[in-house]
Every structure is written in C-alpha cells, then in structure tokens.
Amino acid sequence: MPRLQPAPFFSQKILCLIFFFFYFDITIYPVNLSYDVFDGKGESTPLVFLHGLFGSKSNFHSIAKSLVQRTGRKVLTVDARNHGNSTHNPVLTYEAMTSDLKHLLTQLHIDKCVLIGHSMGGKVAMSTALTQPSLVERLVVVDISPAQTTTRTNFRYYIQAMQEVKVSSDLPRSTARRMAEDQLRMRQFLLTNLVEQNGQYAWRVNLDAISAHLEDIMSFPSFNTTYDGPTLFLGGASSAYISSEDYPEIQRLFPYADIQYIPDASHWIHADKPLDFISSIISFLQS
C-alpha cells in the first residue's frame, strides 16, 4: 500500500511554525526603567506615578514634591519603555510595560504601592492591578478607561509630523525647539522629547515602536479577572476619555471603583488643575 503524503501546503505550514518557535524567542523580557525618587519620612506605602504616551517621569515632579510634603510618603515617577531615559525596545504592549513595572518594583524591594497612572500609564496601572493585585494597595486611573480610545486621538498625525521634522545640528537648543515647533504646529508637550544626542537633535521617544504598536496602545487587553482594591477613576470634566459608556466595563473590572471629575480640566488634569488633582489624591488616600 503506498504511503500517504501530506498536502504540500500543510507541510510547509508546519515547517514554518517549527522554524518560528525554535529559532525566534518570543518571550517578552522586561527592560530597565529610568525613575526618580522623592523620599518622604513616613512609613506608608509609596506612590508610583506612570505617565502617558509621549510623556516622561518629569511630568509629575512638582506633583510628587507636593505629595511628599503633604503626606510624608515616598513618591516614585517612572519613565515607560521607549520614553524619557528608559530603554528602547521594538515591543510596546501593555503586557510588556506591566512586566517592566513589576521588574522595577522587585528591584527596588517594593512589595506594595499605590499606583497612579495617566492615560497610557493609567492602562499600565490597570493591567498591573488586574494581573498582580498583591502589588497594588490602591489604584488611581487618571483620565482614561479600559476601553478603545483610537477615535479620540490624533496620535497617528503627531507621529508622522514628528518623523518629518528636520532640525539642523549646529543650532542652540532654544532655536532648535522653535524650528521644531514651527514645523510641528502642535502641542508643546511633544517638544519636551526633542534632545541633543552626539551633536544631533533627535526625539528621545522611540517613534518607530510607538507607530508600530499604536493600535495596542489605544486599545486595552481583555481581562476576566477583577481588581477588588480601592480604585479612583479621576477624569477631566472637559475631556471625553472617561464617558458614561465606559462605566459598565469599569465596574466589571474594578467593582470598588469611584468615578470623579475635576471641573474645567482637560485630559492633562495634573497640568490644568494641579491643586485639585493633589487634593483628590490625598482625599482618596485618606478614605
């Protein structure tokens, strides 16, 4: 009896899969994150701030200093991968960023913290709370929800515009910023990413990784778990990032969540209304 031969297409597909799994390591390894520490004299659980897309740890420096003075707690501000002074890596998913944060907290011997995340950082904070609830004593999610946010942003345009910016290397930094601003014609916060490296002006964010993973960043992973700790969703009243349509999913994943809005604040609550933002954080910590 003649031996049966597998269909050529099936054989090729199996061989490709075998080659992929044996020759490519698809494990997500954490990268080292840059961070700043603002030491408090108290022994309470430290606060950890996570910034949004195109942001950096410096976004929360003034907030951190104020919270140290008013609460006595240690405060950390952290650069996400591909942002600020943290390591660049082609992968930019919430799984990867959550792994980075867990790695950092382990390195610093922090076994429990209060996580405060804005926008993209808020999604990292939510993902961490849902996958590593023992690490999170309390959770603050700033102007973002566990929902798709692609339709609410112009980030694809921002990335393209930043990639097209040309700045001469022989200019003072102030002049270079003005040139970049003229070419970008967009929000000032993007210009904080323009840095001089080896005599050349460049963006310190990894634009290629952000562009390749923008859909991942704008979406949120699917979870069937819940975080049952105290949670505050803090939105800007003038922002559309936390809408009533998001409430059912927030309540499903975070059954003890409180949703509040700061009047006259946009998506950048901490910049628009820093005193109200700080007061909301302190009230939540004391509740």
Image (cartoon, rainbow, N blue to C red):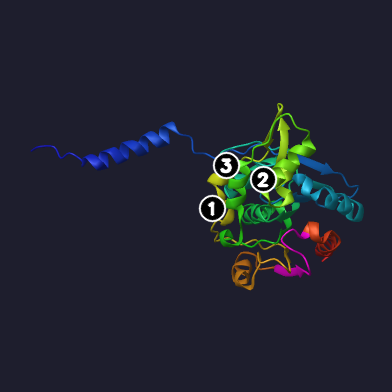
- Dot label at residue 215: 1
Q: Residues within 10 Å of mark 3 (few under 14, many from 20)?
A: some
- Dot label at residue 275: none
Q: Judging from the image, what secondary structure is the residue with disc 2 in?
A: helix
Q: Judging from the image, what secondary structure is the residue with disc 1 in?
A: helix
Q: Residue 152's image quarter? A: bottom right
Residue marked by disc 3: 209
Q: Residue 1's image quarter? A: top left
Q: Residue 41 or 236: which is nearer the viewer?
A: 236
User: Does residue 20 appear in the picture of this structure?
Assistant: yes
Q: Residue 37 or 85: which is nearer the viewer?
A: 85
Name the kind of residue labelled 3 in the image.
Ala
Residue extending furthest toward the bottom = 244
| Earlier residue among tags 1 and 2 | 2
**Residue 109, position in %: x, y?**
75, 41
Q: Which quadrant does the C terminus fall into?
A: bottom right
Q: Residue at x 21, y 42 (%)?
A: 7
Name the kind of residue labelled 2 in the image.
Gln
Residue extending furthest toward the left = 1
Q: What range of the chain is rendered magenta?
A: 257-269
Q: Judging from the image, what secondary structure is the residue with disc 3 in?
A: helix
> For the residues carrying marks 3 and 2, which lies nearer the camera in this image?
2
Q: Are marks 3 and 1 in contact (CB under 8 Å)?
A: no
Q: What is the CA distance from the residue labelled 3 to the residue labelled 1?
A: 11 Å
